[in-house]
Image (cartoon, rainbow, N blue to C red):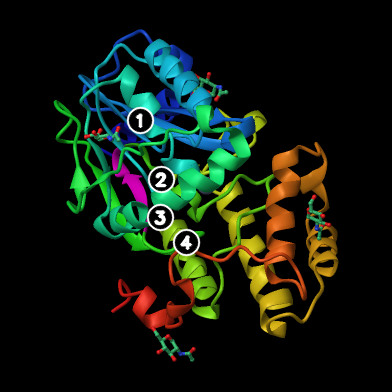
Amino acid sequence: MPSITVTALLSTLTLTIGLQVVVGSQTTKESLCVATYVNTDQAVDMVSSLVIGSQAAMIIDLPMTIGKAKELATWVKTTTDKPLVAAFTSHNHPDHYLSGAAFFEEFPNIPFYANSRATKEIQEDAPKKVEEWSGVHGVDNIVQNTTLPSPYDYSFFALPGDEDSPVYLIGPVTGDTTHSTLFWIPSIGTVIAGDAIFGYNLHMYLSDLVTHALTESWLATLKFTAGLNPFTVIPGHASASENGSFNGVRDLDHSYEYVKFWQEDIESKGPDYFTPSEIFNKFTSRFPDLLINRSPTAFNRLNITAENFGRGGKRRPPLQPLWTFNNTAALNGWIL
Ligand SMILES: *[C@@H]1O[C@H](CO)[C@@H](O)[C@H](O)[C@H]1NC(C)=O
Ligand SMILES: *[C@@H]1O[C@H](CO)[C@@H](O)[C@H](O)[C@H]1NC(C)=O
Ligand SMILES: *[C@@H]1O[C@H](CO)[C@@H](O)[C@H](O)[C@H]1NC(C)=O
Ligand SMILES: *[C@@H]1O[C@H](CO)[C@@H](O)[C@H](O)[C@H]1NC(C)=O
Ligand SMILES: [Zn+2]
């Protein structure tokens, strides 16, 4: 018995990692596989995950700009010939849904979902986000009439024909914002983490951590995720060089260390204790490897943290009333 289990486990692992082998050929009936696409440049290295089953596929997270949404659609069509039956977004940030409508032009009539709280927040925020990001990328590159997700509150879903390999929706949990969903696929030991987890060689987005409770709650989500003991963790953002080599610990450990560093060395000193450049320098001393390739995205996230929390810095006022999330026990309602 144990040796059969190990063999099954190993073949699952091979399918997940050696994706090229799977694409275009038949997968074993009971195995899902996950292919990832790193949406670079304007899409700020956001990772979309394509879950491919025996008869159908679904996708998690859609990019901010129209150009990137079209690029993603092309990739999906070349990666699987199974029909795409749904899209989900992991949380309410615009880099995970804003130009979804351009993607849906290539895959008409498929449902788009998020958990009901994220759905409500997206509905409230989308018009402001369209305005803000049209100012950055141009009105021609941001969908003006946002396709909003519908609320999906089942605690799991299955692709047709793969009812024995469900995908569990774990949430609402705190990641880089409130009300995030983790997608957990026990049959292949894979967590699709959205922005609860960032790639090991990236700075993280901390701008929503306006209360100690949000920080503490994010750390609890990371401990919980580690407890799942995953083979593969797919982060919400990753450098293109990491694509295809996600494992179960590297990005998770990085994310934990990064948020913990924020909590202990910066947040704990109280608001406005450091200047923006002091915060910038503290992170670059502690994580010297993260700016090595000097991509604008790499600089940007750290710059946002530094300016948002540094004395006299340029603030990003949150659209949602994040400062009301000041109670860790309430945020971590999943801990009884
Ligand atoms: C990333 O890896 C997938 C396989 O999972 C591949 O299909 C895709 O083209 C790669 N490239 C990018 C840019 O994500
Ligand atoms: C926006 O999209 C919705 C749904 O796709 C559609 O019903 C509506 O007519 C569109 N509105 C405009 C102004 O284009
Ligand atoms: C953040 O970027 C802005 C615009 O480039 C710059 O003026 C500011 O000095 C940067 N802040 C830090 C702390 O590096
Ligand atoms: C926490 O937020 C609530 C609103 O949700 C507010 O009434 C309360 O004063 C806040 N408490 C602290 C300590 O900031
Ligand atoms: Zn993101």
Q: CA distance from mark 1 to mark 2?
A: 26 Å
| N-term mark: 4 or 2 | 4
Mark 1 is surrounded, within 10 Å at the Cα level, by few (under 14), some (14 to 19) or many (20 or more) other residues, namely: many
Which structural element holds mark 2? strand
Which residue position holds label 3? 125
Q: Quadrant of ligand 3?
A: bottom right
Residue 75 in the image: above or below residue 293: above
| 31 to the left or right of 282 | left
| N-term mark: 3 or 2 | 3
CB atoms of marks 3 and 4 within 8 Å: no
Give the quarter of the figure containing the C terminus: bottom left
Q: Residue at x 47, y 58 (%)?
A: 226
Stretch of the chain drawn in magenta? 180-187
Q: Amino acid at mark 3?
A: Asp
Which residue position holds label 4? 177
Q: CA distance from mark 4 to mark 2?
A: 18 Å
Return the x and y of residue 1 as percentages of the image width and height. Answer: 25, 38
Tell me, for residue 101, which label it has, or none. 1
Which structural element holds mark 1? helix
- Label 2, ligand 1: CB separation under 8 Å: no
- Residue 179: quarter of image: bottom left
Mark 4 is surrounded, within 10 Å at the Cα level, by few (under 14), some (14 to 19) or many (20 or more) other residues, namely: many
Return the x and y of residue 242 as percentages of the image width and height. Answer: 63, 33
- Label 3, ligand 5: CB separation under 8 Å: no
Residue 93 shows in this picture = no
Which residue position holds label 2? 191
